[in-house]
Image (cartoon, rainbow, N blue to C red):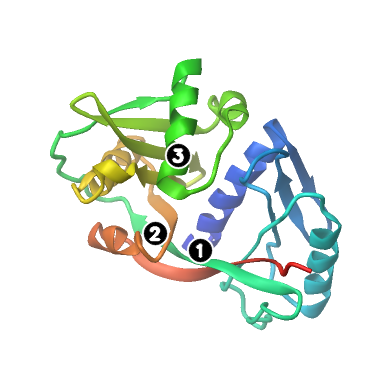
Amino acid sequence: MKNINELNIANLTALWTTVGRLVGNYSKGNACESSIVNHSQWPNKIWIKEGLNTKLLDQLTEQMTSSKIDLVFPHWNIYLDEITEVASDTFIQKSEQTGMSLKLDQAFKLSNSLNFKRVSQKEEVKLWTSIYPKCFGYVISEEILSKTKDEIAFYLFYANDELVGTAIYFPTNEVVGIHGVGIIPEMRKKGFAEEIMKILLNKAISESISYATLQASPLGKGIYKRLGFTEDFTIKNYGLKAI
């Protein structure tokens, strides 16, 4: 079994790969992989699965510069003996996340305040994609959901028939990746994000999945720590500086 950091990254990159393969363009070279969807703000990532060195950084720079789509390079600090500082005259750090994990060995008590529905119908696709930008500030297109919803589980959550938020549930091997847990602004600060997480974690436990993984923003990290997640590594997301 891979260590939990490798499993976390493998789940995340499998998600991007699935989207690129089914909707846009997934490419795997000797050093770099990328997933690009035209007319979309996500995933549009380029990544490596080994320690970063000067040669790889030059290759990343070349591929990102030649791309017609603005790409983001996520650098996860899980390898030994690698370059740790990427920002330079070429790159700028756009955001930072924390890779987190939880061993699934005990079910969570639910408040039963939420109902949820996996996206399957066209009107549900439209609804999910219309509220997701309200939660995160960027768009995941209807085309992505329409073409990937059989392989990736997109969920809508409701409280007393009022829409609350979204989530993405994506199992791979020994883990489930929980992504895109977002609450619309008018429903925030009511404990719904934590309840969504508990629902999805209990679902994973019922499916005999051993670990849950995610990548937390600074704002979301507190919720996950309260649920027992550990902070495992850092992801710094880089783009090219504007010329």
Above or below, 101 relative to 183: below
Q: Which mark is in front, 1 or 3? A: 3
Disc on res. 19: none
Circle 3 is placed at which residue position?
A: 132
Where is residue 148? Give x, y as percent.
Answer: 59, 29
Q: Visible in this render: residue 147?
A: yes
Question: Callout 2: 10 Å neighbours few (<14), some, many (20+)?
Answer: many
Image height of 166 relative to 122, above or below:
below
Q: Position of residue 3 (x, y in %)?
A: 50, 63
Rounded to the nearest angstrom, the CA distance separating label 1 from label 3 is: 27 Å
Which residue was labeled with disc 1? Answer: 5
First in residue order: circle 2 vs circle 1: 1
Q: Is residue 54 above or below residue 209?
A: below
Tell me if label 2 and label 1 are in contact, CB under 8 Å: yes
The quarter of the displayed image where residue 242 is located: bottom right
Amino acid on which the number 3 mark rests in the picture: Tyr
**Crowd class of label 1 (few under 14; some 14 to 19; many from 20; radius 10 Å):** some
- Left or right of 13? Residue 177 is left
